[in-house]
Image (cartoon, rainbow, N blue to C red):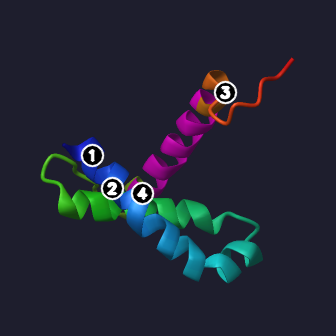
Amino acid sequence: MVAAIFALVNAFIRPVVRFFAFPVILLTLGLFTLVINAGMLMLADWLADGLVVAGFPSALLGSVIISFVSMVLGSMLDVKGKRKE
């Protein structure tokens, strides 16, 4: 259930936030996306009962871990259909 809530938050709310935060993302060379991801994790914590995030530093660390795992799995699974040869 928590994964479904996190997926819905990332699918519907995150693109809107990224659109409005685009100048800040550009100014920080993309590092502000980690703050956005941490905010989405905290929002999912607020919406779901089974997820506990202790505070913003924990959410930021969770955001870094989720981004890293997503990057590694995306490169291993070739998500975009581009095969490296």
The residue under label 3 is 78
| 10 relative to 67 in the view: left or right | left
Looking at the picture, does residue 82 appear above or below residue 43? above
Could you tell me which quadrant the C terminus lies in? top right
Whichever of labels 2 and 3 marks the residue nearer the N terminus, that label is 2
Span highlighted in magenta in the image: 59-73
Nearer-the-camera pick, 54 or 69: 69
What is the spatial separation of the Cα atoms under label 1 and label 2, in whole angstroms?
A: 6 Å
Q: Picture coordinates of residue 62 (x, y %)?
A: 44, 48
Whichever of labels 3 and 1 marks the residue nearer the N terminus, that label is 1
Callout 2 environment at 10 Å: few (<14), some (14 to 19), or many (20+)? few
Residue 10's tag is: 4
What is the spatial separation of the Cα atoms under label 3 and label 1, in whole angstroms?
A: 23 Å
Residue at coordinates 48% horizontally, 59% vertically from top-left?
A: 37
Callout 4 amino acid: Asn
The residue under label 1 is 4
Regarding mark 1 in the picture, which secondary structure is present there? helix
Nearer-the-camera pick, 66 or 7: 7
What is the spatial separation of the Cα atoms under label 3 and label 4, in whole angstroms?
A: 21 Å
Residue at coordinates 42% horizontally, 57% vertically from top-left?
A: 10
Callout 1 amino acid: Ala
Residue at coordinates 75% horizontally, 78% vertically from top-left?
A: 27
| Residue 57 visible in the shown view | no
The residue under label 2 is 8
